[in-house]
């Protein structure tokens, strides 16, 4: 059993002010600060120009936030490793349920987020950038978001679609020039009020990461958006559709994407079928039902503790989209307890220590089916 330190905090102000504040927080940890830097000259002048223009268009304010952070730690904006990792990983299980299937008539989302405990931020924050929608969710590389919900009642979460894409060795190389998932999610949360606006934005965005996004809003609509190597597909549900839930794991689910990526890792298919079987037999679901679903252990459930293989459950989350409420259990261990946060309440800064149970898979982790 290992330990992880969780950071809960609220950020407000202009993008530059938020970045500067994050930088001042970071300078207490010199090793962490050095990890945020790339060598000077990593990008050509043309690449730097293209990145800056792309972020200004699709993630407005992000360049200013990185500028503030860089100034606080004594670096330049283009030295920030966030650019190298974002200018174009993890896996998850994700489920959105519409009011017809929930006991309280609310839109609910259940999510497990898997990654390495040695590379995860372990942060949950509320962000209030001047002129943008307030949102709360988990951070990735400080400036990105792994999931979240905003003040308008839009929830966004992701699972990887196939092998993770990135600029690092052992990752699938990007097929197009575009953004990583964490930049996409933050942009949607800060600039879109509902599923329809988010889908319009996604269709316009260059996205290099192969991603499954589940979107849900308090108006009773949800959608699965998939993109792989630049191709995009969407499935929508609402109160009028036969299907009242939508889910994703770590492979392609929609026909347009499956035809170019038909294979999937066995563990992803297993988790996808487990959710389907559970939901096809369920009705009048409540918070506790979804929490038990998330903490049920693979292969007869969704929770995994393969952290050294970059697939350990970092956090389990249940969103009540209608209420703007998030319940979080860190490490996928019930003994760590569930913490509840409301978007319309002040987020009190706190640090928590939680247990992380490190295991190893007893099968061929990467086997394709």
Image (cartoon, rainbow, N blue to C red):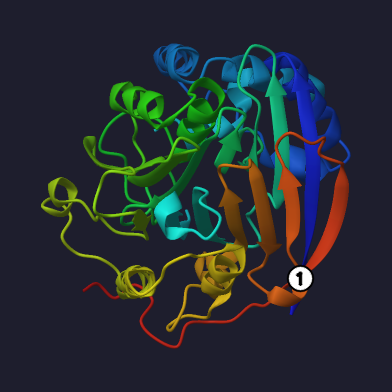
**109 relative to 120 in the view: left or right:** left
Residue 251 visible to the viewer: yes
Vertical comparison of 314 with 8: above or below: below
Image quadrant in which you'd find residue 184:
top left
Residue beneath disc 1:
336
- Tell me residue 164's x, y (percent): 38, 52
- Please state which of residues 225 and 117 is positioned toward the viewer in this rendering: 225
**Mark 1 neighbour density, 10 Å: few (under 14) some (14–19) many (20 or more):** some
Residue at 52 percent across and 49 percent down: it is: 106
- Tell me residue 48's x, y (percent): 47, 16
Label 1 element class: helix
Vertical comparison of 291 with 37: above or below: below
- Please state which of residues 240 and 64 is positioned toward the viewer in this rendering: 240
- Please state which of residues 113 and 95 is positioned toward the viewer in this rendering: 95
- Tell me residue 205's x, y (percent): 34, 24
Image quadrant in which you'd find residue 30:
top right
- Please state which of residues 294 and 365 is positioned toward the viewer in this rendering: 294
Image quadrant in which you'd find residue 215:
top left
Residue at 61 percent across and 69 percent down: it is: 288
């Amino acid at each position: 059993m290992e330990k992880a330190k969780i950071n809960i905090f609220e950020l407000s102000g202009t993008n530059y002010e938020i970045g500067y504040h994050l930088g001042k927080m970071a300078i207490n940890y010199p090793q962490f600060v050095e990890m945020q830097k790339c060598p000077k000259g990593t990008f050509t002048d043309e690449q730097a120009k293209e990145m800056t223009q792309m972020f200004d268009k699709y993630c407005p304010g992000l360049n200013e936030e990185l500028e503030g952070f860089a100034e606080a730690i004594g670096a330049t904006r283009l030295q920030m490793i966030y650019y190298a990792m974002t200018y174009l990983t993890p896996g998850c299980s994700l489920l959105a349920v519409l009011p017809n299937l929930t006991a309280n008539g609310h839109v609910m989302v259940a999510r497990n987020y898997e990654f390495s405990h040695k590379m995860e931020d372990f942060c949950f924050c509320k962000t209030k950038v001047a002129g943008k929608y307030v949102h709360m969710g988990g951070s990735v590389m400080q400036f990105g978001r792994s999931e979240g919900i905003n003040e308008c009642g839009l929830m966004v979460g992701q699972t990887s679609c196939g092998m993770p894409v990135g600029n690092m060795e052992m990752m699938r190389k990007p097929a197009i020039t575009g953004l990583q998932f964490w930049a996409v999610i933050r942009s949607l949360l800060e600039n879109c009020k509902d599923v329809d606006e988010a889908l319009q934005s996604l269709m316009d965005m260059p996205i290099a990461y192969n991603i499954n996004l589940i979107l849900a809003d308090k108006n009773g609509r949800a959608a699965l958006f998939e993109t792989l190597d630049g191709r995009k597909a969407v499935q929508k549900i609402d109160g009028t559709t036969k299907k009242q839930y939508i889910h994703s794991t770590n492979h392609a689910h929609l026909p347009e994407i499956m035809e170019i990526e038909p294979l999937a890792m066995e563990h992803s298919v297993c988790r996808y079928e487990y959710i389907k079987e559970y939901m096809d037999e369920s009705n009048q679901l409540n918070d506790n039902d979804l929490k038990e679903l998330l903490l049920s252990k693979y292969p007869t459930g969704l929770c995994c503790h393969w952290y050294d293989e970059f697939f350990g459950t970092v956090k389990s989350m249940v969103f009540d989209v209608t209420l703007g409420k998030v319940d979080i259990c860190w490490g996928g261990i019930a003994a760590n307890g569930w913490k509840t946060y409301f978007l319309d309440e002040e987020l009190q800064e706190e640090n928590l220590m939680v247990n992380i149970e490190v295991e190893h898979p007893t099968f061929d982790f990467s086997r394709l089916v």
